[in-house]
Amino acid sequence: MKKKLLEMRNITKDFSGVKALDHVNLVVQEGEIHALVGENGAGKSTLMNILSGIYAYGTYEGDIIYDGKICEFHDIKESTKVGIVIIHQELALIPYLTIAENVYLGNECSHHGLINWDETYRRTEQLMKRVGLHENSETAIKDIGVGKQQLVEIVKALSKNARLLILDEPTAALNDDDAEHLLDLLLELKQEGLTAIIITHKLNEVMKVADKITVLRDGSTIETIDPAKETVTPDRIVAGMVGRSLKDYYPKRTPHIGEVMFEIRDWTAYAPNVADKKIVDNVNLTVRRGEIVGIAGLMGAGRTELAMSVFGRSYGTKISGHLYKDGKELNLKTVSDAIRAGIAYVTEDRKQAGLILTDDVLHNISLASLNKISKHGVVDTNAEISAAQDYTKRMNIKVSSISQLTGKLSGGNQQKVVLSKWIMTDPDLLILDEPTRGIDVGAKYEIYCIINDLIAQGKSVLMISSEMPELLGMADRIYVMNEGRIVGQMDAAEATQNKIMNCILQAKETA
């Protein structure tokens, strides 16, 4: 029988009278990987913030029993001291500092106030070997990829003698290879005695690594599933998360595809910071009216760069080529030009580029459509409020009111606000860049339904996604990109993950 390392008992937490957690219970055994799953807003991150001391003792009700002792953490330093370390979804690394400097920041190898750099680099390199990170410890964080940055966060945790590691969406920004490497590493660290709690929406990851699965829904503990005692399937987990079975992850749609509405011809763009580096290389692409066109590719394939360069030249230099809408050539020099032409772009980075998190839902929804609700340069406040309320209702955005700060919403609801902002511009072509990144299966399904509703209205969608099942489930046609070029095209009906990957690999061999 494994020793009980952590018990969170009857944890209750309110935010301004709204109950975020209601008598939540969690038990984690020593040396296990425990998955915490639930829809956005279920309370997963709130629970972990209580455990790590971010929400201090006294701001919640209930008990934390760690290693047999009742703990009262007043800040994150106190939880770290006993070996509880949290790694947030947004990595807390300083780009211009080295790997070693980041690892020991705030936890310096020092004597009488002087940092021992030799010791710092030696210890860092030892820990880096342990996680399979083969960089120089003096390399700046900005010079390594996101996958390696995630490993640096784990190195940082190990440097603090972590016994319980909390990972919040650790693979959200990683490609498939980096995600696989990270999960394998977690399994190796488990063999070494490390205990982990992992928050993730990716059920395949849960199936791969989790010894136990605790399901939260609406701030309450629903159940803890033990794969050793019952057969666990994604459907089984989803039923606990959303309170119902999602028979089809992708809602059914009968395509009614018309003529070519949008065309990209001979499109080329160069990197803004690297001389003579092509990021988009002679791309040709068409989108028909009432069609969802997917763009598949590995991270760095140039998909986002293509979308942004098309959307009013918002990224890239020395851009050349032609854009056509309904047979007429477009000259889109700015984002405003693109919006007026009936094109909208939903960014992959909702927190940094898609929303103003410090502003309310009302202003975020109307931000791209102020011309529609203004007269002589003055915003019609009543029209703005009416539109925001309408979209909040239509998109099923869970808010206390349209005056609620957008930064206080769950990831899924933030994504719906971004979608509302751009749908309000009434686009003919909606470019969606990773539209369901970091959100749960229930919210994903709702967003897929929204996309299908737009298509039913005769709109067109260009969808970039790193989740191949998503493209296969939603798209009518799929283009494959690699190193800035289109290397394949296929109907979704005949496409498979293997075919798409073969397209990419063959392109790499001939490059």
Image: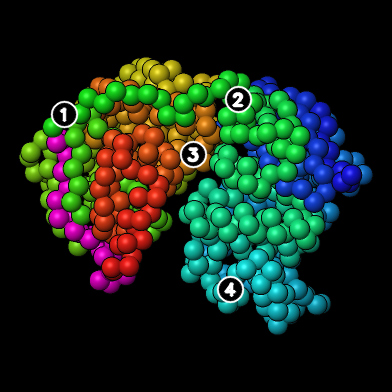
Give the quarter of the figure containing the N terminus.
top right
Residue 15 can be seen, yes or no: no
| Labels 2 and 3: the sequence-earlier one | 2
Residue at horizontal 19 percent and vertical 58 percent from the top: 282
| Secondary structure at numbered mark 3 | loop
- What range is drawn magenta here? 260-282
Amino acid type of disc 3?
Answer: Leu
Q: CB atoms at circles 2 and 3 under 8 Å apart?
A: no
| Labels 4 and 3: the sequence-earlier one | 4
Amino acid type of disc 1?
Answer: Gly
Residue at horizontal 62 percent and vertical 54 percent from the top: 183
Give coordinates of residue 149: x percent, y percent: 56, 62
* Crowd band around label 1 with a 10 angstrom C-alpha radius: few (<14), some (14–19), many (20+): few
| Secondary structure at numbered mark 4 | loop
Give coordinates of residue 61: x percent, y percent: 81, 29
* Label of residue 239 in the image: 2
* Crowd band around label 2 with a 10 angstrom C-alpha radius: few (<14), some (14–19), many (20+): some
Q: Toward the viewer: 206 or 316?
A: 206
Residue 217 can be seen, yes or no: yes
Q: Nearer the viewer, mark 1 or mark 3?
A: 1
* Crowd band around label 3 with a 10 angstrom C-alpha radius: few (<14), some (14–19), many (20+): some
Q: Which residue is mark 1?
A: 258
Q: Nearer the viewer, mark 2 or mark 3?
A: 2
Q: Toward the viewer: 435 or 249?
A: 249
Give coordinates of residue 22: x percent, y percent: 74, 24
Q: Toward the viewer: 89 or 241?
A: 241
Residue at horizontal 49 percent and vertical 53 percent from the top: 176
Q: Which residue is mark 3?
A: 357
| Secondary structure at numbered mark 2 | helix
Disc 2/disc 3 C-alpha distance (Å): 31 Å
Amino acid type of disc 2?
Answer: Ala
Question: Against 111, is 203 above or below?
Answer: above
